[in-house]
Amino acid sequence: MENQAVNEGKTNAIISHFWLIGLIIALILNNSKKNSFASFYIRQMVGINLLIMIGNYIIYNFIGSFAGWIFGVVIFILWLISIVGAFKGEEKAVPVIGEHFQDWFKNL
C-alpha cells in the first residue's frame, strides 16, 4: 500500500522541485487527490523556497554577497538531497530543518 502511494505521488514530488512554478503546479495537482508522498515533498519545497527568498533578500542585501553565496550553496545542497530522495522514492527530510518544514506546513 505504501509503495502505491509512492508510485502515485512520485511525479508530483519531482515537479515540486522545479522552482516556484513547479511547486504551484504540484500543489494544484495534489489538491484534488491528496498523496502523502507528494505532500511530504511539497512541504519540503515550500520551506526550501522560503529559505531561498530569505537568502536573496535578507542575507545577500544586509550581510553581504559572500554570505549570500555561501547560503545559496547550502540551499542548493538541501535541494539536491531532497530531489534525490524524491527520485529514489524515499521520504528523506533535508538535514537540520526538514522535520520543522513537515511540522510548520502540515496543512499542505
Image (tube, rainbow, N blue to C red):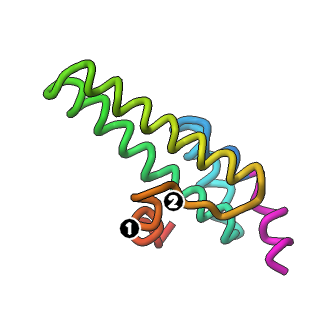
Whether residue 3 appears in magenta in the rendering, the answer is: yes
Q: Quadrant of residue 6?
A: bottom right
Q: Where residue 1 appears, x then y in whole percent? A: 85, 80
Residue in the picture at 50% in, 34% down: 76
Residue lying furthest bottom in this view?
1
Tally the marks.
2
Give the residue at mark 2.
Answer: 43
Q: Amino acid at mark 1?
A: Trp
Residue in the picture at 27% in, 20% down: 66
Question: What predominant SS class does the magenta segment belong to?
Answer: helix
Q: Are marks 1 and 2 in contact (CB under 8 Å)?
A: yes
Q: Is residue 23 above or below residue 106?
A: above
Q: Secondary structure at mark 2?
A: helix
The answer to whether residue 92 is left or right of residue 102 is right
Residue in the picture at 56% in, 37% down: 21
Judging depth in this view, the residue of 66 and 38 nearest the camera is 66
The answer to whether residue 4 is left or right of residue 90 is right
Label 2 Cα crowd, 10 Å radius (few <14 / some 14-19 / many 20+): many
Q: Amino acid at mark 2?
A: Arg
Whichever of callouts 1 and 2 sits on the residue coming sooner in the sequence is 2
Q: Where residue 25 appears, x then y in whole percent? A: 63, 46
Give the residue at mark 1.
Answer: 104
Q: Where residue 49 appears, x then y in whole percent? A: 43, 43
Q: Is residue 52 above or below residue 100?
A: above
Whether residue 80 appears in magenta in the rendering, the answer is: no
The answer to whether residue 53 is left or right of residue 74 is left
Say which mark, if any, is on residue 48: none
Label 1 Cα crowd, 10 Å radius (few <14 / some 14-19 / many 20+): few
The answer to whether residue 87 is left or right of residue 36 is right
Q: Where residue 40 appears, x then y in whole percent? A: 59, 64
Residue in the picture at 36% in, 43% down: 51
Residue segment shown in magenta? 1-11
